Image (cartoon, rainbow, N blue to C red):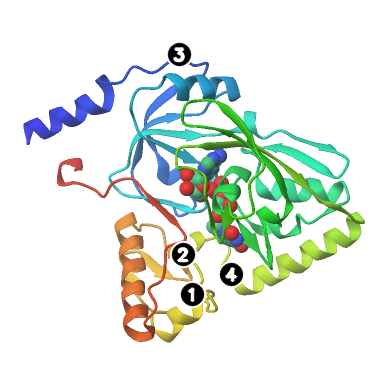
Amino acid sequence: MFFNIFQKLFSKHIHFVFPPTKAEIKTNVPLSKKTWMGVGGNAEFYFEPQDEKDLCNFIKNKPEIPILILGGGSNVIVRDGGVPGVTIHLGKSFANISIDGDHIICGAGLLSMDLSRFAQKNGLSGFEFLCGIPGTIGGALRMNAGAYGSEIKDILVSVRVVDSSGQIQEMTPQSDFFKYRENALPDDWIFVGATFKGTPESPEKIMAKMQDFKGKRESSQPFGVKTCGSTFKNPIGLTAWSLIDKAGCRDLKIGDASISPKHANFLINNGKASCADVEGLGEEIRKRVYDKCGVMLEWEVKRVGLPKQPEDD
Ligand SMILES: Cc1cc2nc3c(=O)[nH]c(=O)nc-3n(C[C@H](O)[C@H](O)[C@H](O)COP(=O)(O)OP(=O)(O)OC[C@H]3O[C@@H](n4cnc5c(N)ncnc54)[C@H](O)[C@@H]3O)c2cc1C
């Protein structure tokens, strides 16, 4: 017991020497406050680089320690034992946006909704589907976010990434790079920016399309609740929500985690849920759907970090 605690303290705070940075590297930062589901433990270390140079220098010279990239936290649930290593968040200094003809160039820390609004104001169509998707461009690229028949890959021209050796790479992704809600980028590479191409259209027509999507969303999804949106990917030719319904899961609850009465693929933290509640509920749904329908649902939401250990108390 004593050894465990000693080892933990040692690994948490003494062992690592970080490269110099203009930003503060914080310790023990609660990630429940930085994620939409609002569950889970702390980031062991938390770093918001001030610019690309700061980020590259950090990645190049950091000790051997795991990293997690956190965007808006709208598709991530953090386990109750927290996230070991460094959680890196691209903040306002990565939220730049500019336009060049029918191209929009932006940073990966920009909110997807802000990109959608910017495109509308500038009379560029193709970005309307992003108007209701929470989170950042970095998260949207990683997840190949999409809605109403469009995905981010459809408007993408190129990406700017920091690779695992801290080098910037400009990439024009090949057609098989992006798949449904995933892509081929190595886990520890970081999107820092992207260039998109739109189609000229009147701002009024673009706004009307955005309003239509907004209405559809409001009628089919819960609002003002702690959720990560769709929990499971839709299996080919099927919808996750209808399988969950068919398996009779609607009224399932574990602790303070339940299923939205408005959308069966949305899990909800009713206020005091732990990650174990949310993840346990998700696993129970997968089991019941498999038993009833013979389909094993695949998690769309990213689960990160470690479960709570007895010595965490
Ligand atoms: C109410 C609600 C509705 C939603 N509706 C939709 C929808 O219609 N369509 C849809 O596709 N999704 C939807 N989502 C899910 C989510 O909003 C998207 O997946 C979003 O694009 C995630 O962005 P984020 O910045 O929050 O990423 P995070 O949740 O912070 O991270 C998601 C993943 O991306 C990685 N990541 C984040 N930033 C970077 C970066 N810069 N470089 C590399 N990796 C990075 C993370 O490590 C993690 O693996 C919804 C979520 C909610 C809560």
Gap in angstroms between the C-alphas marked 2 and 4: 13 Å
Q: Residue at x 77, y 62 (%)?
A: 210
Gap in angstroms between the C-alphas marked 2 and 1: 9 Å
Asked if 121 appears above or below 22 in the picture, the reply is below
What residue type is disc 3 on? Pro
Q: Say which mark, if any, is on residue 221.
A: 4
Dot 4 surroundings within 10 Å: few (below 14), some, or many (20 or more)? some
Q: Say which mark, if any, is on residue 20.
A: 3
Q: Say which mark, if any, is on residue 240.
A: 1
Q: Nearer the viewer, residue 260 or 60?
A: 60
* Mark 4 or 3, closer to the camera: 3
What residue type is disc 2 on? Thr
> What secondary structure is marked by label 3?
loop
Q: CB under 8 Å between callouts 2 and 1?
A: yes
Asked if 298 appears above or below 171 in the picture, the reply is below
Disc 2 or 3, which lies upstream in sequence?
A: 3
